[in-house]
Amino acid sequence: TELGREIQPLQYYLDNGFEYFIHNGEISDNFSTHLWKTKYPQSAPFHDPLDTSLQLIQSFEPLETRSGQPVRIYRFKRR
């Protein structure tokens, strides 16, 4: 979604067969601020429980040879 603005609740993705979620770490940092929580009230709660609701399977952190924000790949946990 565009900057996570139109993101659905986690359950939507589980119900519709999504298996993976690729995440730019900068977005979570933004959604942790009061301003973004106020501006995007539907999207902010999605980012809070990512590490507990999804299984982190790979993380790419910035290095001297790769700048930018962390990128994380999560797998949806099936119940």
Image (cartoon, helix red, strand yellow):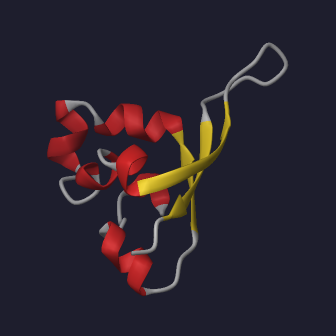
Query: Which residue lies at the image location 45% right of the left edge and 86% below the top edge?
Result: 16
| Place of residue 57 in the rendered image (x, y in percent of width and height, measured from the top left) | 63, 50
Query: Which residue lies at the image location 79% right of the left edge and 25% below the top edge?
Result: 66
Asked which quadrant contains residue 36, the reply is: top left
Residue at the far right in the pictured view: 65
Judging depth in this view, the residue of 52 and 68 nearest the camera is: 52
Residue at the far top in the pictured view: 64
> Would you place residue 16 above or below residue 14 in this image?
below
Asked which quadrant contains residue 33, the reply is: top left
Query: Which residue lies at the image location 46% right of the left edge and 66% below the top edge?
Result: 77
Name the side, left or right, on which 43 lies relative to 78. left
Residue at the far front in the pictured view: 79
Query: Which residue lies at the image location 31% right of the left edge and 39% below the top edge?
Result: 31
| Place of residue 51 in the rendered image (x, y in percent of width and height, measured from the top left) | 41, 44
Asked which quadrant contains residue 59, the reply is: top right
Name the side, left or right, on which 23 lies relative to 53. right
| Place of residue 68 in the rendered image (x, y in percent of width and height, measured from the top left) | 66, 27
Name the side, left or right, on which 4 lies relative to 65. left
> Would you place residue 68 above or below residue 53 in this image?
above
Residue at the far bottom in the pictured view: 16
> Would you place residue 44 above or below residue 76 in this image?
above
| Place of residue 64 in the rendered image (x, y in percent of width and height, measured from the top left) | 80, 13
Numbered marks: total: 0
Judging depth in this view, the residue of 59 and 67 nearest the camera is: 59
Of the 4 image quadrants, the one containing the C terminus is: bottom left
